[in-house]
Amino acid sequence: MLRQRSIIPGFSLTMGFSLTYLGLLVLIPLSMVFLKSSQLSGAEICRILFSPRALAAYQLSFGASLIAAGVNSVFGFLVAWVLVRYSFPLKSLVDALVDLPIALPTAVAGISLTTLYSPNGWIGSTLAQWGIQGSYSRLGVVIALTFIGLPFVVRTIQPVLKDADPEVEEAALCLGASRWQTFLKVLLPSLVPATLTGFALAFARALGEYGSVVFISGNMPMTTEIVPLLIMTKLEEYDYPSATALAAFMLCVSFLLLFVINSLQWWSQRHRKKLS
């Protein structure tokens, strides 16, 4: 049986360039992390990964990322809903501002948030009256991670909302369903996969964030030190084995998150096809 030829030529050439580009920029550099970590014994790796300082950094990084992704899932859903379902003045400007955390340098975001939530800042002074510390605390880490993760939720839910067929909602209303019942039983099931995907993307983005957090957290070991900062600290101390072991662990977590995100996207596409 003859292999069917593609209408667009150049598959072999473009595939070769793609694999070479991917290997040079992604696979080879990342493999060096595992290669360097393989020089350590199992006992040394366990000592590094499960040291009290590392466990405290894991707790803060994963915990703050989960909280930030959960907050973004709720408010990102609301922002996407408003942008799709309503028309109002300066809507294009608001839509563009959603992407600002992605375009803004993380260091600038960190300095801005630190100034805003410091005890002398606009919001920080109000929080201080209630005994709440914004900057240089774990709350500051959550604030920074929420700031950088919002666009991922909004941009994941927004196209699904745009593709939703309004005739289905109108049919539910004509059959006697209330607006709340229409939202819960007709619209929400189609938005759950997109919301979960946005949550996973925001969580993955927050887990690897460094620039914005390093300013607002205060960088106190065992208290406000995140895993990326701990890796940088090990590198500055010339403790390369510990840095590579921690980096390899976070790299494995990143691969796992990518697998989850791709599975959610596949499930979302399959779910949307069933509904259509």
Image (tube, grey):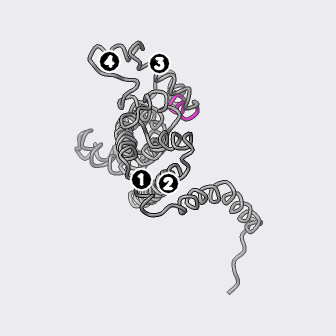
Distance between the alpha carbons at the discs numbered 4 and 1: 36 Å
- The picture places residue 26, in percent across and down from the top left corner, at 63, 55
Task: Kindly identify the amino acid type of the residue bearing the numbered disc 2.
Answer: Ala
Label 3: element kind: helix
Left or right of residue 66: residue 185: left
| 3 or 2: mark nearer the eye | 2
Q: Considering only order in the chain, which callout, 1 or 3, is on the residue closer to the N terminus?
A: 1
- The picture places residue 242, in percent across and down from the top left corner, at 50, 50
Which residue is drawn at the image coordinates 45% and 41% (left, top)? Answer: 206
- The picture places residue 40, in percent across and down from the top left corner, at 51, 61
Callout 4: 10 Å neighbours few (<14), some, many (20+)?
some
Label 4: element kind: helix
Task: Kindly identify the amino acid type of the residue bearing the numbered disc 4.
Answer: Leu
Whether the magenta-drawn stretch holds residue 88 is answered as no
Q: Considering only order in the chain, which callout, 4 or 2, is on the residue closer to the N terminus?
A: 4
Distance between the alpha carbons at the discs numbered 2 and 4: 39 Å
